[in-house]
Amino acid sequence: MSSRSRKLAFGTAGILVVAGALCAAFVPGVAGEVLTFTLIALGLSGALLLVFLEIGLGEERDLAREARQRDTREQRTLQLRRRSRLPRRPRRPE
């Protein structure tokens, strides 16, 4: 999920909450109460889901970074082992 789409999603959630508040102020009766409750509930629950998504994406980025670091360490270890296995020439007596 791109940064732009995340900002758009958070903005949409905020707009839903504001629209719910406006319905509470300007729409009378039961219809206004239902619209208020529905819009605010959708906006707040959407924002909460987006927060959890952000947390999950952050954890996945951390796991991917750790995996890259682990692979790099393993490659270095393999290179060192290969170098240590090379036969050595015997020294000439002086």
Image (cartoon, helix red, strand yellow):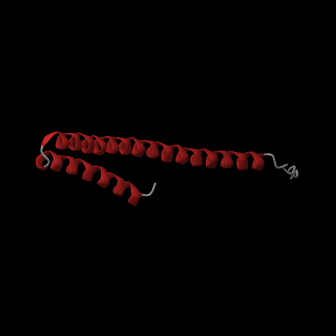
Residue 36 image offset from top left, x and y in percent: 20, 43
Tell me which residue sits at (46%, 46%) in the image.
Answer: 57
Tell me which residue sits at (28%, 42%) in the image.
Answer: 44
Left or right of 26 on screen, residue 74: right
- Compare residues 71 and 64 and report the one nearer the observer: 64
How many labels, in total?
0
Residue 7 image offset from top left, x and y in percent: 34, 56
Q: Is residue 36 above or below residue 11?
A: above
Tell me which residue sits at (26%, 50%) in the image.
Answer: 16
Left or right of 8 on screen, residue 27: left
Tell me which residue sits at (32%, 40%) in the image.
Answer: 45
Residue 4 image offset from top left, x and y in percent: 39, 60
- Compare residues 20 and 54 and report the one nearer the observer: 20
Identity of the residue furthest to the bottom in this view: 4
Residue 77 image offset from top left, x and y in percent: 68, 45
Please tell me in which quadrant of the rendered image residue 48 appears.
top left
- Compare residues 69 and 89 and report the one nearer the observer: 69
